[in-house]
Image (cartoon, rainbow, N blue to C red):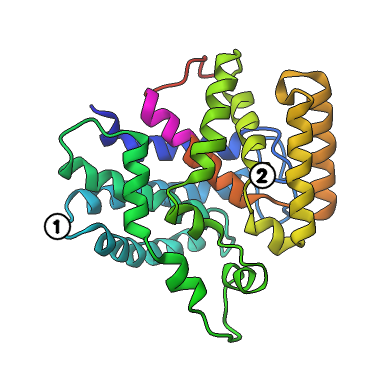
Amino acid sequence: MNSLMRLSEYLSQAILLEVSAYPKPGLVTRCANGSHNDMSLITFMMSSVVVSETFYQLFDIGRNFAEDEKALFKRVREWGKESEQKLLSSTKGVNTQRGILFAGGILAAAGGFLSETSLAEVSVQKLCDTVKKMTAGLVHKELECLEQNSNLTAGEQLFQKYRITGIRGEVEQGFPSVRHLGLPALYDAFSRGACINDALVQAMLSLMTGVEDSNVIWRTNFKELEKVQENAQKILLKGGVFSKAGRRELKSFDEYCIQKRISPGGTADLLSITVALFLFENGTFPSMII
């Protein structure tokens, strides 16, 4: 089976690996609940089933879609809203994975679309370019053209206050943080002999240095986002998961995030996309699955 036809499988594996990886500052992992008192690994397991099902459904929608990429995105949006309600129902109203449902769902639909329109081998770049075509004008339409009202979502409010585009900006630009930060860090970690868990943590730190994480800003403020980026860079400069100093710094950073209620959930979503695209390129990991 070609890698494109397995994209939904890779996305499903990626969301489970992301939530399990430890330590991730302020985030839910297999060992701790991070900055959250309303969710745990169990909460994520409940919603992951819904999210995974949606990936497969949206891939099939893309594969059978007869119109262009922009029309496909409109269809994805409609389907995604129904899936969001299923997700929230599975967790009794707790928002665990709406970000990756959105981003991963678009990627899955793009993969399905390419599976029927491209005879050549599809690259990560081609996949991301299709995402860009699907979502062209999204920030302008959904954020820049907003009027002031009392019913704005968190992402909409942050755009109006800080011009942060969040996950909408990432998809419209074809996941630049994943391509320029996440994937290179993941490849580098594996080349240095890291196990899967440590490679994911290292990639997460790399993403944290550059992602304008709307979830961090929403729970705290823009100044704390800058501290998060600086701390992630500091940990990497000390060796990250490859050194005792890096691991000590990472532990302290996790404690700081918990104290300040910082949760870089937007970055976690992009880690899932990073893992899925790594698997798309390679089919498996170079280290043991343990």
Q: Amino acid at mark 2?
A: Val
Residue in view at x 83 percent, y 23 percent: 245
Q: Which residue is mark 2?
A: 28
For residue 261, side relative to residue 27 (left or right): right
Q: Which residues are magenta?
A: 275-282
Give the distance between the C-alpha atoms of the residues marked 1 and 2, in whole angstroms.
40 Å
Q: Quadrant of the N terminus?
A: top left
Q: Which residue is mark 1?
A: 66
Residue in view at x 48 percent, y 78 percent: 145
Residue 103 location in percent, x, y? Answer: 45, 52
Secondary structure type for disc 2: loop
In the rendered image of this protein, does residue 149 appear above or below residue 208?
below
- Verify CB contact (< 8 Å) between mark 1 and mark 2: no
- Is residue 87 part of the magenta span, yes or no? no
For residue 196, side relative to residue 136 (left or right): right
Residue 22 location in percent, x, y? Answer: 67, 32
Comparing 9 with 225, the one in front is 225
Q: Amino acid at mark 1?
A: Ala
For residue 279, side relative to residue 114 (left or right): right
Q: Quadrant of the C terminus?
A: top right
The answer to whether residue 66 shows anywhere in this view is yes
- Is residue 281 part of the magenta span, yes or no? yes
In the rendered image of this protein, does residue 195 appear above or below residue 15?
above
Residue 131 location in percent, x, y? Answer: 36, 51
Residue in view at x 64 percent, y 35 percent: 206
Residue 105 location in percent, x, y? Answer: 38, 52
The answer to whether residue 108 shows anywhere in this view is no
Q: Quadrant of residue 30?
A: top right
Q: Count neighbours of disc 1 (C-alpha within 10 A) and say few if under 14, some if 14 to 19, many if 20 or more.
A: few
Q: Earlier in the sequence, mark 1 or mark 2?
A: 2
